Image (cartoon, coloured by chain):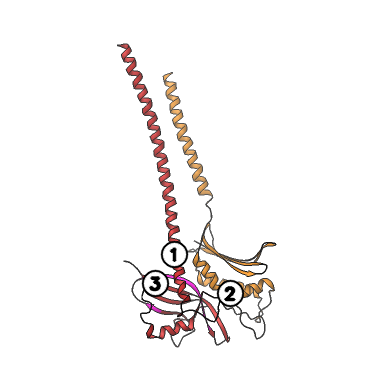
Chain colours: A orange, B red
């Protein structure tokens, strides 16, 4: 009888330890298996997009008119996709210019602090949703990144430029 | 005598049980304590990182504010707060009257990001086909950079032209 009571107590103690261990394993398992994507809004990325939108491109749409800025070129690409006087389409020049600017500003790769980037330009309206204009990626992006967005008003919605730099 | 022995033995057993319970409670409290310390230390380490990021963002905004000062700002466009007049900045470099003007700054440099040219530092011969204009460079500093647009009138295309660049500012570092 005495032996049985002692055994019961040991079983109780072991049960508590086992329950705690299982709870710990489940908690750690969930935490490690699904790391939440951590985006930090970055001031420098906002400054980067804002400044790159002022970039004067090589594209002249009409004879005797001026070289247009990147934000106007993106609007042109979304609305009409006319060709520039050099024969390239406005979307092609916009994408090429944006890629070259991003490559110059952010060195990415396995040997650099930043492993990759993703740049997405899309058109958003409340009524018809989202329409992708172009996207540029380089390197490898994981769940750890800094990012920011820039809005260009284009009636009835907005053109949104989103940039993610992954570390 | 037998009665005293039985009573003593019963009390001993009760004490042992209380001891056992206290041991389990203490063990559980220690376990929870360790887990809490672990959790709090992780939370605080990320909090410290967040504070550092916010501080950096504030410094970056301050660095960018220099683009709005009369010595740098681009007045040809009303709606470009990030634009600086590259011709003006280059002229500042040549003027001796501006020596010692930025007293709290150990480094003040404007860098072209895209497109890059062959010449690094701008001189009267190489301007505007050069990549950087250094206004101040002295001592030890901790540097911060901020993206801006470098604008000027371009003779080749006969219009205003803006290109992406950076302002680099260095502040005295504590050794």
Left or right of B18 in this view: B65: right
Quadrant of res B79: bottom right
Label of residue B170 in the image: 3
Label of residue A85 in the image: none
Q: Residue at x 58, y 74 (%)?
A: A97
Chain on which label 3 sits: B
Chain on which label 2 sits: A
Q: Which residue is mark 2?
A: A97
Badge 2 crowding class, 10 Å Cα cut-off, few under 14, some 14 to 19, many 20 or more, is many
Is residue A133 visible in the rendered structure shown here?
A: no
Question: Magenta span has B145?
Answer: yes
Q: Residue at x 42, y 54 (%)?
A: B45
- Write the start and end of the magenta stretch as one range: B135-152
Q: Position of residue A133 (x, y in %)?
A: 65, 68
A8 or B95: which is nearer to us?
A: B95
Q: Position of residue A117 (x, y in %)?
A: 54, 64
Gap in angstroms between the C-alphas marked 1 and 2:
29 Å
Gap in angstroms between the C-alphas marked 1 and 3:
13 Å
Can you tell which of label 2 and label 3 is closer to the viewer? 3
Chain on which label 1 sits: B
In the picture shown, does residue B13 fall above or below A36?
above
Can you tell which of label 1 and label 2 is closer to the viewer? 1
Q: Position of residue A44 (x, y in %)?
A: 49, 67
In the picture shown, does residue A152 fall above or below A142?
below
Q: Secondary structure at mark 1?
A: helix
Q: Which residue is mark 1?
A: B56
Quadrant of res B17: top left
Gap in angstroms between the C-alphas marked 2 and 3:
30 Å
């Amino acid at each position: 009888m005495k032996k049985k009571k002692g055994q019961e107590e040991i079983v109780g103690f072991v049960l508590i330890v086992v329950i705690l261990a299982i709870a710990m394993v489940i908690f750690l398992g969930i935490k490690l298996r699904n790391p939440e994507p951590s985006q930090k809004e970055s001031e420098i990325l906002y400054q980067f997009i804002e400044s790159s939108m002022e970039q004067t491109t090589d594209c002249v749409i009409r004879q005797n008119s001026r070289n247009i800025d990147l934000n106007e070129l993106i609007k042109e690409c979304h609305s009409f996709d006319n060709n520039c006087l050099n024969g390239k389409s406005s979307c092609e020049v916009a994408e090429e210019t944006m890629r070259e600017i991003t490559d110059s500003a952010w060195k990415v790769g396995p040997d650099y602090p930043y492993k990759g980037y993703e740049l997405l330009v899309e058109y958003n309206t409340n009524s018809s949703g989202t329409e992708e204009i172009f996207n540029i990626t380089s390197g490898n992006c994981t769940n750890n990144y800094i990012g920011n967005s820039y809005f260009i008003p284009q009636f009835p919605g907005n053109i949104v430029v989103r940039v993610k730099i992954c570390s | 005598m037998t009665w005293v022995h039985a009573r003593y033995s019963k009390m001993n057993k009760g004490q042992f049980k209380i001891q056992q319970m206290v041991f389990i409670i203490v063990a559980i409290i220690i376990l929870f304590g360790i887990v809490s310390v672990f959790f709090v230390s992780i939370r605080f380490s990320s909090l410290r990182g967040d504070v550092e990021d916010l501080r950096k963002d504030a410094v970056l905004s301050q660095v960018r504010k220099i683009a709005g000062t009369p010595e740098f700002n681009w007045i040809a466009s009303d709606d470009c707060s990030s634009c600086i007049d590259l011709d003006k900045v280059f002229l500042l470099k040549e003027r001796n009257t501006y020596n010692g003007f930025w007293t709290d700054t150990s480094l003040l440099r404007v860098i072209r990001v895209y497109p890059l040219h062959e010449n690094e530092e701008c001189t009267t011969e190489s301007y505007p086909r050069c990549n950087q204009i250094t206004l101040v460079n002295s001592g030890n500093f901790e540097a911060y950079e901020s993206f801006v647009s470098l604008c000027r009138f371009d003779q080749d295309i006969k219009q205003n032209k803006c290109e992406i660049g950076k302002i680099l500012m260095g502040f005295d570092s504590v050794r």
